[in-house]
Image (cartoon, rainbow, N blue to C red):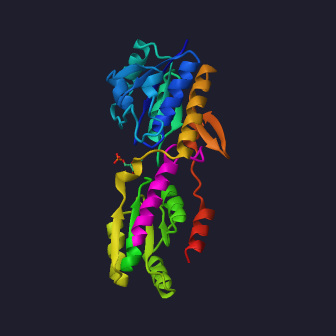
Amino acid sequence: MKTIGILTSGGDAPGMNAAIRAVVRSAIYYGCKVYGINRGYKGLIEEDLEEMNLSSVGDIIHRGGTILKSSRCEEFKTEEGRKVAVKVLKKYGIDCLVVIGGDGSFNGALKLTELGFPAIGLPGTIDNDLAYTDYTIGFDTTINTIIDAIGKIRDTSSSHERVNIIEVMGRHCGDLALYAGLAGGAETIIVPEINYNVDDVCNKLDTTKKRGKRHSIIILAEGVGNAQDLGKEIVARTNADLRVTILGHVQRGGSPTAFDRILASKMGVRAVELLLDGKAGRVVGTRANEIIDMDITEALSMTRDFDKETYEMAKILSI
Ligand code: F6P
C-alpha cells in the first residue's frame, strides 16, 4: 500500500479543492493512505499534516480556495529546508507527494525529485502561465469573474459616458487579460507580451467615440504596469472622464466553474494513477482536450507562446 502526501502551494486558485478531492478519493479507492499537508511546503517543514479520509473531502468540490491552505515558503528554497521536509515525509511513511500549484511550487517538486523523493505536479494557478498545458486549474473561473466585473462596470461606464481601465491579475502572463477582454467585449486589451503605446490607446478612444460608443473598457494586465499611471497619461492626452478599477483578489475566489471542476478531477485522478505506476518527477496538464503528463524538467523549461492570433482577432472585433 502506498502512502501519498498532498499539498497546495503558492497563490490559491478555484478548483484546487476539486483536485484535492480527486486525489484523496481516487487514492483511497486504489487502497492508498493519504496525508493532507497544511499550508504548502511551510506546513510540511513544520510537520502540519493529518491523515485524510473519504469525508475529509466531502462538500468541497464547489468551494473556492483550498481546504489545505496555501503559502509561499522561503525556507523550502534552501537545501536545509528541503532536507527537513524530506525527513518529515519519511517520518510519516509518505512514499510520494502531489503538489498543486504554479511554477514556483513545481520548482519545489522538482527539487524533491532530485533528492530522490517522488513528486507529481498539478497546475493550480489562475494565471495560465505554464507553457506545457493549455489550461491551468482556476483560469476559467477567474475569466468568468472578470467578465462579470466587466459587464457591471460597462453598465455604469455607458451611463456616464466614461472610459474605464480594469487592471487584472496574471503576473507576467497576459492570458487573463486577453481572454477575459475578448469574452467581455473590451475595446482595448493591453498585455505584457505585446508592446503598446499610449497614443494608439488614445486614438482608439477617439475613433470609437466618433462612431457613437458611449463607453470604453480598457483591460490592463498587471504585468504591464500600474493602471492609475496609465489612467493619468490618458486623461492628460484626451481629457476623458476616466475611472480605474483594480480587481485584485476578488479574482482568486469564488466557486469553480464546471470546466475547472472537471479539469481538476481528471488531473487529480491522473496524478494518482501515475504514482501507482511508479512514475514521478512529472506534471499533469491538458492539451487539445486530452489529459497529458510530462517530465517536470522539460515542462519547466518550456516557454509560453502568446496567442497572437486571438489578440489580433479581439482587436478586429472591437473596432
Ligand atoms: O499567481 C497568482 C496571483 O494571483 C497573480 O496573478 C498575482 O500577481 C499574485 O498571485 C498575487 O499574489 P499575492 O496573493 O501573494 O498578493
Q: Is residue 128 magenta?
A: yes
Q: Is residue 215 something that shows in the picture?
A: yes
Q: Quadrant of the N terminus?
A: top right
Instruction: Give the percent coordinates (x, y) of residue 118.
Output: 53, 23
Instruction: Give the percent coordinates (x, y) of residue 79.
Output: 39, 27
Residue occupying the point 40% across, 40% down: 65
Q: Does the magenta stretch include residue 154?
A: yes
Q: In which quarter of the image is the C terminus?
A: bottom right
Instruction: Give the percent coordinates (x, y) of residue 162.
Output: 38, 77
> Which region shows up in magenta?
127-155
Give the quarter of the image for residue 215: bottom left
Q: Nearer the viewer, residue 58 or 17?
A: 58
Residue occupying the point 65% across, 44% down: 287
Give the quarter of the image for residue 237: bottom left
Q: Which of 118 and 165 is in front in this view?
A: 165
Question: Which residue is at the far bottom?
Answer: 210
Instruction: Give the percent coordinates (x, y) of residue 266.
Output: 60, 35
Q: In this view, does 70 lie above or below 139?
A: above
Q: Is residue 162 something that shows in the picture?
A: no
Residue occupying the point 49% across, 30% down: 21
Q: Nearer the viewer, residue 214 or 286?
A: 214
Q: Is residue 17 above or below residue 279?
A: below
